[in-house]
Image: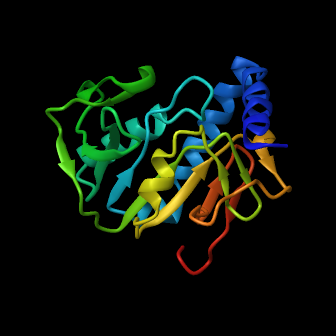
Amino acid sequence: MTKQELRKHFKAIRLARDPHEKRAADSAVCTAFTESDVYKNSRDILIYVSGDIEIGTIGIIEKVLSDINNCADKRLLCPRCVSGTNEMHFYRINSLDDLESGHFGILEPSSECERIDEYVKALCVVPALSFDSKGYRLGFGKGFYDRFLTDFKGITVGLCCESCLTEDKLPCDEHDVSVDMIITEKSLIKISADNI
C-alpha cells in the first residue's frame, strides 16, 4: 500500500473505535507514560495536544502540569506551527489556559508563551497514525515532526493504539527517524536500548 492508502486504512481503524474503549486506552497510555522511567528522568517534556483520532494527550499534559505545581523540575513544551510553512517551534505552557485554537483546529500555545529552543534532558512525544516494529512512523503527511526530529537530540516516544501497530515495515524515506519507545494501552516497546 502507498502512504496515502495506509493513512486512510489507519484513520478508518481509529474512527471505528468505540468511544469507551478509546477513553480506557487513553487512560492506560497516560498512566504507562507518566510512570515510565523516561518520563521521571526527563526535564523538558515536548508534547503535542491531541486531535480526535489520536491517543489523548490531555491527561498526560495535566499530569505534567500537576508535577510542575508540586515542585518537579520539569518544563512542559507544546508545538506551535509557523504560519505558511511546515515548521513548528515549542513553547512553554504553565496551564491549559495557555492553549488556543491554531492550525488545523488543533490547540497550541498562544503567541504570548515563551519559545524554547534549547532543551535539557528532553523527551519528545511524537504523533503518528501507525508505528512499525522498528519504531518508524506513519505521520499525518505534513512533515512537521520529520523536520523537527532531524536535529532533536533527546528521547522520542510514540503513543499509539495497539490496533495501529504493524509488524509490516512502513514506507519510510532516508531522512525518517525512528522513535526510541512506543507506548500502547497494552505494552511499552523499547526500540533503542542505547538511548533509554
Count of numbered labels shown in the rendering: 0
Q: Horizontal and vertical percent for residue 102?
A: 34, 24
If the image is split into quadrants, where does the N terminus sit? top right
Residue drawn where x is 52% and y is 54% of the image: 35
Q: Horizontal and vertical percent for residue 3?
A: 73, 43
Q: Nearer the viewer, residue 56 or 67?
A: 56
Residue 34 seen by the camera: no
Residue drawn where x is 85% and y is 55% of the image: 168
Q: Nearer the viewer, residue 172 or 77?
A: 172
Is residue 95 positioned above or below 104 on the image?
below
Where on the picture, by quarter, is residue 85?
A: top left
Where on the picture, by quarter, is residue 106?
A: top left
Is residue 142 positioned above or below 71 on the image?
above
Residue drawn where x is 43% and y is 61% of the image: 40
If the image is split into quadrants, where does the C terminus sit? bottom right
- Horizontal side, residue 85 vs residue 69: left or right: right
Is residue 178 positioned above or below 80 on the image?
below
Q: Nearer the viewer, residue 116 or 63?
A: 116
Q: Horizontal and vertical percent for residue 150?
A: 46, 64
